[in-house]
Amino acid sequence: MADLSDALPEFTKWPTFPFEGDLRLRQLDPPVETEPPRLGEDPATCLACAAPEDAYIWVSDRWRVRALERPTGLPMVLILESRSHLDLGDLPNLFAAELGVMTVRLERAMRSLDGVARVHVNRWGDGSAHLHLWFLARPYGRLQLRGTFLSLWDDILPPIPEEQWRENCALVAAWLAEFGGRPLAEPPRIDWKAPSTLGAEEIGSGQTSSGQPSGATVDQQQRDSGQGTPADARGTEGTSTPVDVADNPPANGRTSATDDADTDPTIIQKSASRSAFGVPLDDDEGWEEGV
Ligand SMILES: [Zn+2]
């Protein structure tokens, strides 16, 4: 086992690093001789394969996109999965080409959301065997969230409001559906009630999926299992649970990030781009069939 120096790496001094104060390096365990199987290594036990359509915000013949089970600190976190049980290196050329198209399309859809400056695209693959790519939206103006530690900040920041999160899911699903496939996330229902009755029941309940999707079980297990493999933190520490907008209570308040977004002059431009949602800036009709 290599002895690690006690000197902390330079990135701990970066303004984007989420922690300060006294830090200490964790020592490395000796390498194992045989790595343990990842979740779903056997397709028969793969929960991504078994997840029902309503665990996703959008589906097509070969791809599915899901959100987390509830809002998190970033404006939007989505996961792109192949419908077939494949990993990145297994993709046939057609799938590989479509993955590029889907990546660009999803990045563009998420970047069109209000208050989103950038979309990070990550694939770790240490937690689950079934191909899944992470798309994490960075809030506009939040320069400390740039770069490597965005996924950590997602767990640190207070969750965004539930209604905004649902709307973001629906907007991305609608955007993707412009090119084919099926949107499954719906915007929050406008529920005309006297203010005194608000809170008596969940806002927007019953509008989409029914019950807890089995896909949620996968990630709940991952969440419950505690600390996943650090190299695939996003895939193993439980932030990958599918959207289930029906069962979650509405969140209260707005995050400072979204408050900033509200005063951001670029929002006008972003809202305008969203108003043109039905006309995505894409001309790749040839991909509509399966993508
Ligand atoms: Zn699978």
Image (cartoon, grey):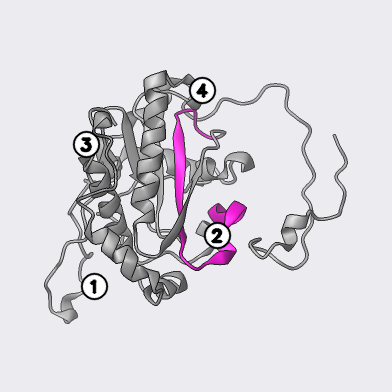
Task: Answer with the quarter of the image where residue 255 lies.
Answer: bottom left
Which residue carries the number 2 mark? 153
Which residue carries the number 1 mark? 199
Crowd around label 4: few <14 · some 14–19 · many ≥20 (10 Å): few
Crowd around label 2: few <14 · some 14–19 · many ≥20 (10 Å): many
Using the numbered discs, state the Cα–Cα distance from disc 1 to disc 3 in whole angstroms.
Answer: 37 Å
Q: Residue at x 29, y 32 (%)?
A: 291
Give the number of callouts.
4
Closer to the eye: label 2 or 1:
2
Mark 3 C-beta to ligand 1 under 8 Å: no
- Kind of residue at badge 4: Gly
Q: Are marks 4 and 3 in contact (CB under 8 Å)?
A: no
Closer to the eye: label 2 or 3:
3
N-term-proximal mark, 4 vs 2 = 4
Mark 1 C-beta to ligand 1 under 8 Å: no
Secondary structure state at the residue bearing disc 2: helix
Using the numbered discs, state the Cα–Cα distance from disc 2 to disc 3 in whole angstroms.
Answer: 33 Å
Secondary structure state at the residue bearing disc 3: loop
Query: Which stretch is magenta?
Result: 127-152
Which residue carries the number 4 mark? 89
Using the numbered discs, state the Cα–Cα distance from disc 4 to disc 2 in whole angstroms.
Answer: 29 Å
Q: Position of residue 158 (x, y in %)?
A: 47, 67
Which residue carries the number 3 mark? 180
Q: Position of residue 134 (x, y in %)?
A: 46, 43
Q: Are marks 2 and 1 in contact (CB under 8 Å)?
A: no
N-term-proximal mark, 4 vs 3 = 4
Please say whether residue 250 is visible from this viewpoint. Answer: no
Closer to the eye: label 4 or 1:
4
Task: Answer with the quarter of the image where residue 266 lies.
Answer: bottom left
Crowd around label 3: few <14 · some 14–19 · many ≥20 (10 Å): some
